[in-house]
Image: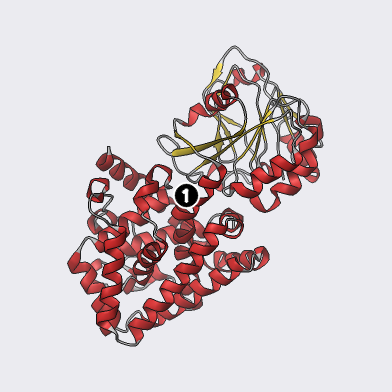
Amino acid sequence: MVSWFSVDDVTYSLPYYHLSDICITLCYLKLALFCPGLMLTESLGSSHITLSLWTDMAVLTLLRINACDKPDSFNKLQKEFESQSGVTIYPNGHLVSRISDFILYSVEAGVIDKVVSEYGPSTKVGAIVGGQTSCKAPELAAFDKHLPQDVEIVSCHSLHGPQVNPKGQPLVLIQHRAKDESLRFVEEVLSCFNSKYVYLSGEMHDRITADTQAVTHAAFLSMGTAWHANQQFPWEISRWVGGIENVKINITLRIYSNKWHVYAGLAILNPAAKKQIRQYAESVTELYKLMIEGRRDELKRRVRAAGAAVFKEGTEKQDLLLSDEVLDRFSLSKGTRETSPPNNHLSLLAIVDCWSKLGIVPYDHMICSTPLFRLWLGVTEYLFRNPDLLDEALDTAIDDKTFRSDDLEFTFAARAWSDCVSFGDFESYRDRFERIQQYFAPRFADAVSLGNEMMKTILEKTSNETS
């Protein structure tokens, strides 16, 4: 599913132009974009593209925008944009790709090769081509294989979700096969984000996104799977109350409210991600065994050694700690913290153990970290840099069986997601994801709204603390 946009030279600056999850500045540029199915996030009130111009609509008449989607959407899109001067919907990508100066593919990583093989040969001579996939190895391989040699390649990736303000967030630029002036051109096009440019190779991008996203996603996917297996809505149960629990619930629902392929591509197509997800499952399993076998001393030694390896001396200045008091107000539960029993926080213990086993120090990649990763790291720090809370969690793991059945399902879930990723099974991933998605769907609206406020508050807080 693709779309293209070509913009003639204009004499006005058009500050914001919403298209799927991309916000583009059009300023004296010719532009073409590929977007998945012309899909717009539900928060913007449409199941497919809406051209939301945050300036005087009259400026649109100065642009020539050529666009297309999959063939069966042609008539619908043509009708949708018939009243918008300067927008022309074409029946296929060849008619647009051949006249576009900048083409940005925002299709699923799993189908990028197929899409580029079909439309890449029609790319205009001298055009610049990029992509927004979360895994660059298959994307850049497709460009190298199918694009003409007289086409330049500058890829990109915004490291945040569509509902996060892009200002100040990392935006990776990959000068894969392009002149410096072409890179400057792309920088200008994307300048309306007000994001921080991070310049990487495709290989380094994939390694860093694996380090900062793969295990984080696996943890939340496993939580949702465990709650689903136990037929629980955690916000209705008193033991899931409190700041850390609020993060677990809100972010889990936030992830499951998105499209499955957003996470599948990163997990399955990125070799580094596969390794990390497998290690996370192993860490969860091994820690759970220590818990149920009552091996207190060994559990404490292992967890504390992992914490010492990850939270090294000198990282305090990069502190992202988040207090329970700050997070308490972001709750779907009607209960109070006082009614909630101590939790062993297996998911947090395992993520630090996993980082330790893989030699990952999360602070090394903070410049490329997603808001979700910074939030999860902040909560993890809060547990590991609070000795009393960490001791309570470890003693709870041995002495208190309140969460034992939840931890069992969580362990099963972590291993199942790891197997799914290792097998490279997109359909299995989709089936598993969408079944759980359907289970939690009735609460997505509340969770996403609350999660947005939580994310905004926490990002402001961490930004102030690290500035």
Is residue 243 in sight in this rendering?
A: no
In the rendered image, which quarter contains the C terminus?
top left
Which quadrant of the rendered structure holds the N terminus? top right
The image quadrant that residue 99 belongs to is top right
Residue 312 visible in the snapshot: yes
Q: Where does residue 254 sit, x and y in percent of width and height? A: 47, 56
Q: Amino acid at mark 1?
A: Ile
**Measured along the vertical axis of the image, is residue 135 above or below residue 126?**
below
In x, y percent, where is residue 140?
65, 43
> Is 47 left, or right, of 412 in this rendering?
right
Residue 361 image position (x, y, % from top left): 36, 55
Q: Which residue is mark 1?
A: 208
The residue furthest top is 11
Q: Nearer the viewer, residue 226 or 236?
A: 226
Query: Which residue of the protein is positioned furthest toward the left in this rendering?
Result: 388
Give the side of residue 163 with respect to residue 297, left or right: right
Query: Which residue is painted at 57% across and 53% down in the image?
Result: 262
Left or right, 188 with reference to 344: right
Vertical placement of residue 450 versus 148, above or below: below
